[in-house]
Amino acid sequence: MQEEKSLNFLEEIIENDLAAGKYPDGIQTRFPPEPNGYLHIGHASSICLNFGLATKYKGKCNLRFDDTNPSTEETEYVENIKQDIAWLGFTWDKEFYASDYFEQIYHFALALIEKGLAYVDDSSAEEIAAMKGNLQTPGKNSPYRDRSISENKELFEAMRAGTFADGEKVLRAKIDMAHPNLLLRDPIMYRIKHAHHHRTGNAWCIYPMYDFAHGQSDSIEHITHSICTLEFIHHRPLYNWFIEQLGIYPSHQYEFARRNLTYTVMSKRKLLQLVTEGHVAAWDDPRMPTISGMRRRGYTAKALRNFADTIGVAKRENIVDIGLLEFCVREDLNKIAQRRMAVLDPIKLIITNYPETEEFLTAENNPEDADTGHRTIPFTKELWIERDDFMEAPPKKFFRLGVGLKVRLKHAYIVECTDYKKDANGNITEVHATYFPESKSGQDTSGINVKGTIHWVSTQHAQTATVHLYDRLFKVEDPSSEEGDFKSYLNEHSKTELHTVYIEPALATAKVGEHFQFLRLGYFCVDTKSTASQLIFNKTVGLKDSWAKEQKNNGLN
């Protein structure tokens, strides 16, 4: 009997809340991205968590865009975020934007002014920072802190009307400049920003800060469990303070630890740098940890969901081995990817005793799924094989081709190498072999035993393609923790392009997004820029499962 999976701490909270009858209409969660970049694997975990909890407890999950910073937000990001969430397999209940609530949030601010709990401050950003103090020293009150309610209201309305320039004034909450939590030392609620907004245009020139907009947006939507990452734990008292002072629906914030990934960075600011400075081609570059980059590389939605489920939910941050993600990808692709043959670094194999005809062999499309059926592969006397599958002076345990060595050609015959040719530069150009007619796969009566099997493609029928091979984006496990510029740790060999790859005919009609296992080479996906006349395949992940092997060696499996 399978052991029941234990609850994580958020599930325990929700089950206790439901048992206490707190939410008779069910729980309401939300996923609130800021549309200032593409989502990455960290966001995927948050998506799976918020939507997953709503599904498990028969609640609902909203998609709400936190679009309160017009200078960094674009409609392109909004549309890509929606595409990513849908691709991951989730459907939101309602689609909202913080900008939907600008008028309501503005009136919340007026309400706090009228209660004497907010004031307009003329101080500069530098002056405000200097007045805030530190953990050892209490802050100092602003000289504008005691403005009258009527003056604050008049100034705030003038801020909205566009009377003042950017940075000339801000609206601050009046809490306590000596509070031990620095975030409660009269935090800024509104700033002036004369910038075009992707949805509201030029209707507004003041915008609420995250800490003022977020909790109020949650309250408006009656969010029962507002789930944030751990860096917002110190924001929670402020989240609660605004809700309590306004007397609005009491949404509650809960925090979980983000999981970083080895050999990459998870900061949207740093990812934006990689894009704008040309270190990667775009947000969807297959080396990027963005959801769109992983999708383009060939990672599946199911693999990302399984990864999120495997790493789970915790209260302490840690860094996750990228090998675990690759394990989840490989595990899914093994079940769904069609098997094909491709030769990345070709040399010619001539079977000297094979007739000048062609033969069509039968091969299964996926041994993990009998319903995928079989395909035919043309076989002729001249084949392309991998250069690495031949050695002039093979070592003792080399089970591929060398003069006098025998090997099986996948789905075909056993051959024995007889000789080879070189060009003037000493490069191998041809390998010669003879075949054993009675050794045909599935009908072998030869009695010959070989330890090696290699793949091949008929030269007469081969199609050509471009293949992109990918390695880690960074050379160090945690580039963000290293000294100096994180970009100095970029792996200059993270992408290799092969422009003369030979593929079997069945790959000629491969469509964008389709997954294949190239036998002995790894899993590959058809790139978004691929065309019928110029096929491009991205290597998704290799066949070797280093992560699972490491866990087994550590006694964890």
Image (cartoon, helix red, strand yellow):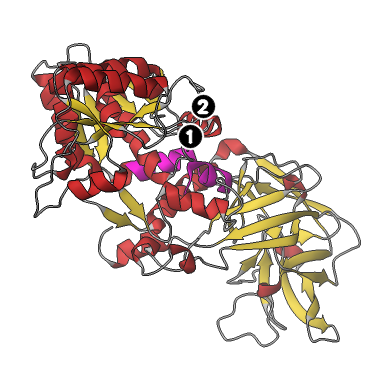
State how far apart marks 1 and 2 are (Cα).
Answer: 7 Å
Q: Which mark is residue 363?
A: none
User: Residue 251 lies in what quarter of the image?
Assistant: top left
According to the picture, the residue beneath numbered tag 1 turns out to be: 73
Judging depth in this view, the residue of 19 and 176 nearest the camera is 176
Question: In the image, is residue 400 part of the stretch drawn in magenta?
Answer: no
In the rendered image, residue 105, in percent from the top left (x then y), is placed at 30, 19
In the image, residue 246 lies at what x, y percent?
17, 18
Q: Residue at x 83, y 82 (%)?
A: 421
Q: Name the residue carrying label 2.
A: 198
Q: Say if 340 sits above or below 8 in the image.
A: below
146 to the left or right of 285: left
Give me the residue at 59% from left, 86% from top: 395
Viewer-closest of 408 and 169: 169
Where residue 518 sits, quadrant-wise, is bottom right
Q: Are marks 1 and 2 in contact (CB under 8 Å)?
A: yes
Q: The C terminus lies in which quarter of the figure?
A: bottom left
Q: Which residues are magenta?
A: 286-308
Image quarter where the N terminus lies is top left
Amino acid on which disc 2 is placed: His
Which residue sits at x=15%, y=25%? 117
